[in-house]
């Protein structure tokens, strides 16, 4: 069983956390990410008003890659640092909206290539027009000279990093227009940071988790605020939050000042992830300095920060370090439990026990056990507790499903 190796010993974590938190809450990578989200969200909004339905920001990566050339699913998943299954799932709404299509691969008739449809090609072309409009807005905020500097420096970083969306046969084609570069560069950077966190022991991370993790304050953050920050639905953020909770990085509790609202809080394991992420970011910044040189790197960070603040993207999103909030998290009690939230420990234990039958060990089982281990133990038989929660009929249905899984 692959339990996370992440260290959660409170003593060294307490020593490192104050400095790490201040770096986590305000840094050039956060500014760059906020600019990318702003850019892609503004373009999507404008395109939706032009009659392109069902657009979401998650479409940007796949569409950008397929705009260069058709690709097999396995290649696209690799470019996006996703599993094949997760990539297929993310492509379904894009295909349903009519922006991509499949055709036989001329190199292998048994395989399929994914490519932009006529509608998808038109979308990409119109998106470039919208990005040009956004770039003009950037110039109005930063000035022509400083935007030119920022664009050139960003293009140099992009060329050095060779993100998949702008690379082909070892060559990188970084656009000179800043707004057209931000999304691909940010995705590339976040993939590297995630890989570093995985190497540090956080083995079950997914690219989408950053949407939630970077927006949680030490005093907790409502899911709606996180969704608003990412320009996505609360349902999408709630799904990610549930996965993070199962993996032990966050927990849902009632807000201290208002027990009627629910907030997302870090756990001690989540705080360890912050410290490890800051270490990864420091290494990344050293790499960027090597590309640009110290003076040019400082200029790049200064211009990114200037544009970030000029657009008022998310200043003050995370509060300064609070020893009281951190100590509450490390003690396992960041906020009161939400009234009426059912305790799922018996169900989780039951599922884990059933799925751990020979031949059925999997990462999903690890997630169930992690979540069950964090939930308080209940007296009595698990089966009886499950039946009291679900009712007899649903419990019987669950057992039939588990029997099918074991078959």
Image (cartoon, rainbow, N blue to C red):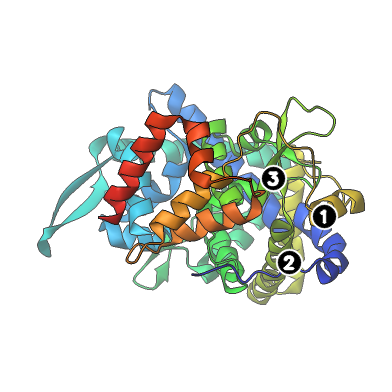
Residue at 51%, 37% (x, y): give it: 236
Instruction: Give the alpha-carbon distance from disc 1 to disc 2, as whole Å.
Output: 11 Å
Do tag 1 and tag 2 residues touch (Cβ < 8 Å)? no
Residue at 32%, 36% (x, y): give it: 122
Residue at 80%, 47% (x, y): give it: 333
> Closest to the observer: 23 or 34?
23
Q: Which residue position holds label 3? A: 215
Q: Which residue position holds label 2? A: 8
Q: Residues within 10 Å of mark 2 (few under 14, many from 20)?
A: some
* Quadrant for the C terminus in the image: bottom left
Q: Earlier in the sequence, mark 1 or mark 2?
A: 2
Occupied quadrant, residue 241: top right
In the visual, does 204 lie left or right of 62? right
Does any portion of residue 299 appear in the rendered image?
A: yes
Against 254, residue 370 (above or below) is below
Q: Position of residue 146 (x, y in %)?
A: 71, 51
Against 273, residue 313 (above or below) is above
Q: Which residue position holds label 1? A: 331
Against 292, residue 210 (above or below) is above
> Closest to the observer: 90 or 31?
90
Q: Position of residue 356 (x, y in %)?
A: 41, 61
Instruction: Give the alpha-carbon distance from disc 2 to disc 3, as whole Å.
Output: 21 Å
Q: Residues within 10 Å of mark 1 (few under 14, many from 20)?
A: few
């Amino acid at each position: 069983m692959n339990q996370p190796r992440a260290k959660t010993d409170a003593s060294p974590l307490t020593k490192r956390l104050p400095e790490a938190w201040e770096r986590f809450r305000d840094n050039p990578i956060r500014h760059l990410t906020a600019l990318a989200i702003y850019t892609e969200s503004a373009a999507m909004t404008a395109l939706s008003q032009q009659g392109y339905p069902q657009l979401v920001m998650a479409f940007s990566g796949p569409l950008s890659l397929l705009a260069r050339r058709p690709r097999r699913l396995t290649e696209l998943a690799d470019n996006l640092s996703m599993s094949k299954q997760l990539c297929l799932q993310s492509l379904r709404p894009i295909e349903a909206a009519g922006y991509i299509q499949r055709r036989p691969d001329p190199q292998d008739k048994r395989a399929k290539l994914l490519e932009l449809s006529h509608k998808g090609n038109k979308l990409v072309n119109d998106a470039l027009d919208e990005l040009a409009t956004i770039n003009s807005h950037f110039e109005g905020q930063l000035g022509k000279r400083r935007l030119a500097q920022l664009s050139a420096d960003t293009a140099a970083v992009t060329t050095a990093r060779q993100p998949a969306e702008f690379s082909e046969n070892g060559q990188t084609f970084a656009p000179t227009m800043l707004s057209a570069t931000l999304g691909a560069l940010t995705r590339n950077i976040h993939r590297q940071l995630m890989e570093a966190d995985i190497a540090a022991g956080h083995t079950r991370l997914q690219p989408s988790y950053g949407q939630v993790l970077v927006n949680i304050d030490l005093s907790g953050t409502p899911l709606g605020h996180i969704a608003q920050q990412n320009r996505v639905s609360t349902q999408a953020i709630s799904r990610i939050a549930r996965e993070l909770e199962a993996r032990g990085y966050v927990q849902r509790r009632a807000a201290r000042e208002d027990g009627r609202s629910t907030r997302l809080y870090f756990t001690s394991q989540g705080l360890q992830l912050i410290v490890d992420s800051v270490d990864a970011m420091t290494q990344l910044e050293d790499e960027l300095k090597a590309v640009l040189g110290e003076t040019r790197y400082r200029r790049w960070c200064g211009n990114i920060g200037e544009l970030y603040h000029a657009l008022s993207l998310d200043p003050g999103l995370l509060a300064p370090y609070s020893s009281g909030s951190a100590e509450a998290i490390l003690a396992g009690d960041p906020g009161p439990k939400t009234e009426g939230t059912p305790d799922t420990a018996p169900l989780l234990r039951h599922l884990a026990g059933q799925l751990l039958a020979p031949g059925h060990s999997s990462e999903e089982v690890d997630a169930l056990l992690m979540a069950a281990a964090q939930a308080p133990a209940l007296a009595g038989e698990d089966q009886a507790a499950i039946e009291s929660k679900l009712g007899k009929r649903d419990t019987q249905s669950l057992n039939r499903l588990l029997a099918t899984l074991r078959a």
